[in-house]
Image (spheres, coloured by chain):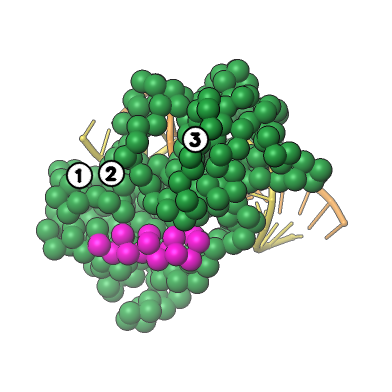
Chain colours: A green, B yellow, C orange
Amino acid sequence: MPELPEVETVARGLQAAVAGRRILSVTLRKTDFIDDPAAIERELPGRHIVRIERFGKFMLLQLANRVAIATPAGMLVETTSEPVTEALLVHLGMTGHLAPHAAEQPLAKHTHVTFTLDDGRELRYTDARRFGRMAYLAGAALSSELERFGADPLHVTSDEFARRINVSKARIKALLLDQSVLRGVGNIYADESLWKAKIHPNRIGALLSPAELEALRKELRKILLKAIELRGSSISDFVDAGGIPGDYQQHHKVYGREGQACSRCGTKVKRIIVAGRSSHFCPQCQPAPRTARGPRRALRRSQKKTKRNRRRATSKR
DNA sequence: CTCGATCCCTGGACGC
DNA sequence: TGCGTCCAGGGATCGA
């Protein structure tokens, strides 16, 4: 599941592989995940892919009419120095892949978009679940779209991080996942950073101490950088633009480790639902808040969920 | 403002 | 082998 490190990995791969190429033609198949399919068919043919950047969990394929000089590969930790005025936004959702292929290579299942490039290759987007998103945006529409998102967790200052988290009565897990607070953090890295900073996912943002906030910011940043170094976590079917999986999943301390021993204290890792998402934590290292938001509520929720699934199952028949 | 509920979607795991 | 069922989850949206 692509979060910031995985998207960064794919973006770097694409920057090396297709930056500078011109798009000759576009073929769309399923389009229900595309904001305005006609705009893509109309605007992309003839455009050059100037460079590929990551923005939160999005990739921005910056476009231009003329050839521009591509930045060297590997220098791609998100830059905002030059204004982007025209871009294809790609969100990989859960199962999206964007990668170049030889034209003669057969189409993989669930290939929904093909861009034919001027060197004969094809840039193909595949996405089994179609939880991804694609949009062509330019000018004011592009900037206002990007403004909806919060700070980049790699570059956010202590002050801004504290300001964004500390004013909210929402739970810290929900805040970490909220793309308008921080852009790019998903379930894996939220759980991992909370474990490392010894903060329970149900804690209220406004009630975290300055020391806890700073620990969280630093650990989150360290974890994300390490994960980028290892080219992301491959837990379902994530692979980079060259088809190579990442290695960070071997470093997960709590995510996907329910029932296993906490590597710090040996207590069994627990899983609860917070903000509608699985949350993995160590009940010993990450003490629960005193408020009534703890196990009882989680229990009630899981009972409801069971009922809902039963209802859904019966109504289908 | 914050929350839960619901929907989108399909592959994979699991039970029988 | 095969079928039914459940589950995973990011994000949008709606109503409480």
State the residue position of label 1.
A164
* Quadrant into which the C terminus of chain A falls: top right
Percent coordinates x, y for residue A218 in the rendering: 25, 62
Q: Is residue A103 above or below residue C8?
A: above
Amino acid on which disc 2 is placed = Ala
Q: Nearer the viewer, mark 2 or mark 1?
A: 2
Q: Is residue A15 magenta?
A: no
In primary-sequence order, the first of circles 1 and 3 is: 3
Residue at the farthest bottom position: A266
The residue lying toward the viewer, choosing from A221 and A54, is A54
Q: Left or right: where does residue A314 sit relative to residue A201? A: right
Q: Is residue A248 visible?
A: yes
Q: Is residue A307 above or below residue A42?
A: below
Amino acid on which disc 3 is placed = Ala
**Cβ atoms at labels 2 and 1 below 8 Å apart:** yes
Measured in 3D between alpha carbons, the distance from the residue under mark 3 to the one under mark 2, in whole angstroms, is 28 Å
State the residue position of label 2.
A151
**Magenta segment boundaries in residue numbering:** A218-232
Q: Are marks 3 and 2 on the same chain?
A: yes
State the residue position of label 3.
A68
Percent coordinates x, y for residue A225 in the rendering: 37, 62
